[in-house]
Image (spheres, rainbow, N blue to C red):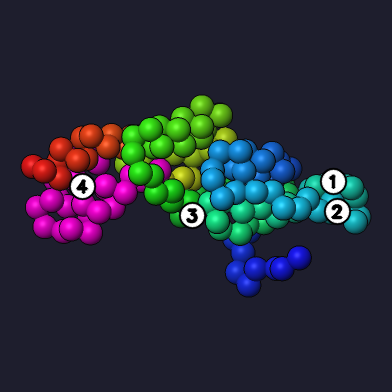
Amino acid sequence: MTIAKNTICLWYNGDAEAAANFYAETFPDSIVSAVHRAPSDFPSGKAGDVLTVDFTVAGIPCIGLNGGTTFKHSEAFSFQIATDDQEETDRYWNAIVGNGGQESVCGWCKDKWGISWQITPRTLTEAMAAGGAEAKRAFEAMMEMKKIDVAAIEAARRG
């Protein structure tokens, strides 16, 4: 077993394993690689409860820590998933929102565990990188959206 040099640790309230399984089922290049049980009681659980879960989300190594209710997630951290088309955008958005999550604006949503996601079509990222009037039009179109509408962004790019 190789331990990654840098791993994202995400705090959960007892449901790290469920979250990791959902991510592994939803996103490519994702897997749950290990579930570790507490060797003794801890502040938010008992000996034998799931303490940490090693998993990968879209190629990013993570650890889910069942730390209890002390800390909450915020939009200060999010996973940004680049999508190639509307079908892929819809698939990820609908999986997150349809599984107890909630919509936000500008391509952002939260899963039912409170983790924020940016489901971002590549055409939007490309428009922003182009700069100038193209970026301005795409940005203004995006500001009116919840889930990103790829056709509307492409139309805005063309002017």
Residue 131: x and y, percent?
16, 59
Q: Quadrant of residue 22?
A: top right
- Marks 3 and 1 sit apart, C-alpha to C-alpha, by 27 Å
Which label number is shown at residue 38? Answer: 2
Q: Sequence-wise, which precedes: disc 3 or disc 1?
A: 1
Q: Sequence-wise, which precedes: disc 3 or disc 4?
A: 3
In the rendered structure, are the residues bearing label 4 and label 1 in contact, judged by CB atoms less than 8 Å apart? Answer: no
Q: Is residue 137 left or right of residue 28?
A: left
Q: Quadrant of residue 60?
A: bottom right
Q: Sequence-wise, which precedes: disc 2 or disc 1?
A: 2
Q: Residues within 10 Å of mark 1 (few under 14, many from 20)?
A: some
**As drawn, 47 above or below 95:** below
Which label number is shown at residue 63? Answer: none
The magenta segment is 119-145
Q: Secondary structure at mark 3?
A: loop
Frontmost residue, 99 versus 124: 124
In the rendered structure, are the residues bearing label 3 and label 4 in contact, judged by CB atoms less than 8 Å apart? Answer: no
Q: Residue at x 89, y 47 (%)?
A: 48
Which label number is shown at residue 139? Answer: 4
Q: Residues within 10 Å of mark 2 (few under 14, many from 20)?
A: some
Residue that badge 3 annotates: 77
In the rendered structure, are the residues bearing label 2 and label 1 in contact, judged by CB atoms less than 8 Å apart? Answer: yes
In the rendered structure, are the residues bearing label 2 and label 4 in contact, judged by CB atoms less than 8 Å apart? Answer: no
- Marks 4 and 1 sit apart, C-alpha to C-alpha, by 46 Å
Residue that badge 1 annotates: 49
Q: Residue at x 69, y 48 (%)?
A: 32
Frontmost residue, 54 versus 2: 2
